[in-house]
Structures are given as C-alpha cells and as structure tokens.
Amino acid sequence: METRSAARRTRTSNAHKFKSGLSLWLVVWLLACRCAPGLACPRLCVCYHTPMTVSCQSQNFTSVPAGVPYDSQRVFLQNNRITELRADSFGFETQVLWLYSNNISWVEAGAFSNLRVLEELDLGDNPSLRRLDGGTFRGLERLQSLHMHRCRLSELPADLFHKLYSLQFLYLQENELSHLPDGLFSDLVNLTHLFLHGNRIRMLSENAFRGLVNLDRLLLHDNRIRQVHRRAFRDLGRLTILYLFNNALQELSGQVMRDASGVQFLRLNGNPWACGCEARSLWEWFRKARVSSSELVCSSPAPRKGQDLRFLRELDFALCPLPDPGSLAGTTTTTFSTKTRWWFSKSKPAATTKGVYHKGSDTLKAFPFSSVKSSHPAAAAAAYELTAEEAALPKVEPEEYWANYGNEDSSVRCFELECPPGDDSLALPSSSSSSSSSPSFLLLLSLSMLYLFLHMLFG
C-alpha cells in the first residue's frame, strides 16, 4: 500500500511539474512573439510581431531609443521630446517611421540613407525644425508619403527631393516658406498630392512646378501670392483640384488656366481681383471652361466693385487692347485698341498685296468720333456719316484716341483672319522702318489731324 501511495504521489508531482513547465514555456513563447527574434524590445517601448512593430510613443524620449530591432517594419516615435536625428539610428527594413510632434531641430544628412524600403516618413509638427540639408532624404527612392507640416521651415534646398521618384504625397503646409526654388519638385514625376497652404509664398515662377506631370491636387491657399507666371502650370495637365483662395492675387493670366486644362474644382475667392482689361484673358477662359468654381469678387475698378468677374459682359471689355501673341509675358499691346482695329479693317490693303501699308492723310477720315460735341451738328454729320455696320461697333471717345496718338501702328498686324492667305507677316510699318516717320511727314500728319478736328467742331 505504501508503495502504491508513493508511486501515486510521484506521478502527481511529475504532472504538476510538467504543467508548470508548460505554462512557463507558453509565457516565454508569448513574450518572444512580441519581441524581435533574438533581440529585446527597447525599454519603455512595446513590440509586436507580424508585422514587426516597435511603439515608443509618448514616453518623453529625448533621443531615438537604443535597441530598436533592425528588422522592425514600423517604428512609432511620435509625441516625445527627441531633438535630433543622426545617421544609423534606424533599421534597414523599416517601411513606416513616425516622428511627428517632437522637438527635432536638426537632421543629419543621410540620417535615413539606410532605409531603402521606407514608404512613409512623418516629420510633421516639429516647430524647431527650421531648415533641412540637401541630402536629408538621400536614398529614399521608395518613399511614397512625406509629412513636414507645421515645422516652421523657412526655405527648402533646391535638391531636397532629388531622386524621390516614388513620392506621391507631400505635406508642406503651415510652414514659413516665402518662395519655391526653380526645379524643386522636378524629380517628383509620380507626385499626386502637394499641400503648400498656410505659408508665406509671394510668387510662383515659371519653373516652380516643373516635372509634376501626374499632380492631381495642388493646395496653395492662405499664402501671400501676388503673381503667377503665365507658364507656371505648364506641366500640370492632369491637375483636377486647385486652391488659390485667400491670397493677394489681382490678376491671373488665362494661359495659366489653359495649361491646367484638367482642373475640375477651382477656388479663387478671397483675392482682390482687378476687373479691368487685365482680367479679360481669365474671363475668356471661364467662358469656355467647365469647372466648379468659387466666386471671384472684383475689388477694382470702382464701377465693378462687388461684381463677380466670371459674369462680366463682353461689352465690359470692348475697349480693351487685344493680347499680343508674340509676348512671352502675356502682356497686351497698348495701341491695338478698338479704334485701330476698326480703322485697319476698313483701310487694309488688298489681299493680293504683300507690301506694307503706308498710312496717308486721307485715312484720317476713317476715325469715327461719334461722341464729339459740336455747335454745328449738321456740319459734323456731313464730315462723316456712319454706316449701319460701323454704328454697331463700340464707340471711341476722343480722349482714348488722343491718349494713344502717335503709336497707332507700332504693333498692329493683320486683323484676325483678314490677312492675305499664306502670309502672317503683313504689318503696318513701325516708326523705325517706314519712310513716313520722317519729321516732315509727322508735321504734315499733325496739321492734317488738327484741321480735321477743327472742321468737325466748327464746320
């Protein structure tokens, strides 16, 4: 009996030991599953397996903690007090790295150069990070999303995004950027979202967005933009959303918007729009575009203040100069006014002639001064009688004519489609090339004009 009882006690003890050992083994295995194989999790951090994740957020770290496993795929270090980032601080297999809401003020060049498979980097909300070196993101050729919002960045090196060919999302909003270097984004051929709102940008140069051929969304609102180069958007043919509201824009060339031909949602409100002749090209673009747009409230001139630029009438631009097609700056001529177009359409040379047209004193009778006040109406009517076609043209005030007197021919070319076939060079002679610019001719022309004007006034 005693032998059986002892054997039973032995078996019970062995079973208890086995269960205890099994339980201990299970605990060790569970802990091992939470930590990297063969490496301990950094102190105060929590580690998870599949995918390998190291979470060290909100632990008051002042530097990147030591012991982060090199095969960690996701590393979360946000909401700490980290002040600087040095090279070799992170593992080779990290794909997601969050460092937002720290006190980072310095990033060593090449700090991320070992992260060849990194896809997302968040450095946002680091208000002490005011500058970055050109090689900061060297080697991140797989990076798809880069966050640098609210960092008080005042400038960006021209080569900061060099070779970031895979980048799709770039967050630069709410910094202190005052300008964008030419070619800054030229390597970002796959970028689709660019956030630049809430900065201090004053102008957009011709090459500011060069290379962004796949950009879909561009946010530039809440800046200080006064000028946009007429070819600034020439690579943005796939842009669908453009925000430029709350800036200092008074005018915007229609060529800017024609380059961004795919825009569907456009916000331009909150700008002091000038709705004189400078607004004509943008107004013409709105007439043809199919776009969801905000209002564009005119600030000037006084008669149009409070009106919406989009809904102005063609008559509002009747006396404006036509665009100069040869001007790269998108300016307009100062002499191709309504009176000049009317006069040239009536006095142009025969279509079979390719020589220049020399203006003589007889052509002066072609200028209609329909609003000239005369003490002898009958005499004025006899001096020039308008046809029905001419009466339908916009009227020219004498002040407008005399304001441009002497430059009528300096930049006039054939009127629209009325040039001789196959000849696009027909032009009135300039003062430098025409023999009619001699002093004697100008004196004769002035006397003829004076005579005509006195005859219209006093008969």
Image: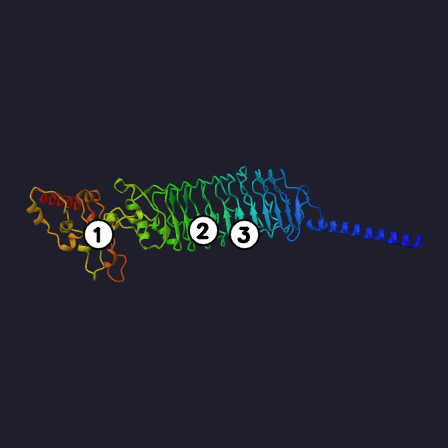
Q: What amino acid does circle 2 point to?
A: Arg
The label shown at residue 144 is: 3
Residue, disc 2: 217
Instruction: Give 195 or 398, whichever is nearer the viewer.
Output: 195
Q: What amino acid does circle 3 point to?
A: Gln
Q: What amino acid does circle 1 point to?
A: Arg
Looking at the image, residue 60 sits to the left or right of residue 178; the answer is right
Q: Tell which circle, 2 or 3, labels the residue nearer the N-terminal end.
A: 3
Instruction: Give 447 or 125, whichever is nearer the viewer.
Output: 125
Instruction: Give 431 or 176, whichever is nearer the viewer.
Output: 176
| Residue 390: percent from left, percent from top | 16, 53
| Residue 441: percent from left, percent from top | 17, 47
Looking at the image, residue 196 sits to the left or right of residue 346; the answer is right
Badge 3 density bin: few <14, some 14–19, many ≥20, Cα 10 Å? some
The residue tagged with tag 3: helix, strand or loop? loop
Instruction: Give 455 or 40, whichever is nearer the viewer.
Output: 40
Which of discs 1 and 2 lies nearer the camera? The answer is: 2
| Residue 56: percent from left, percent from top | 63, 43
Q: Tell which circle, 1 or 2, labels the residue nearer the N-terminal end.
A: 2
In which quadrant is the C terminus drawn? Answer: top left
Q: CA distance from mark 3 to mark 1?
A: 55 Å
Residue, disc 1: 341
| Residue 186: percent from left, percent from top | 48, 51
The residue at 40%/55% (across/down) is 262
Q: CA distance from mark 2 to mark 3?
A: 15 Å
The residue at 35%/55% (across/down) is 290
The residue tagged with tag 2: helix, strand or loop? strand
Q: Tell which circle, 3 or 1, labels the residue nearer the N-terminal end.
A: 3
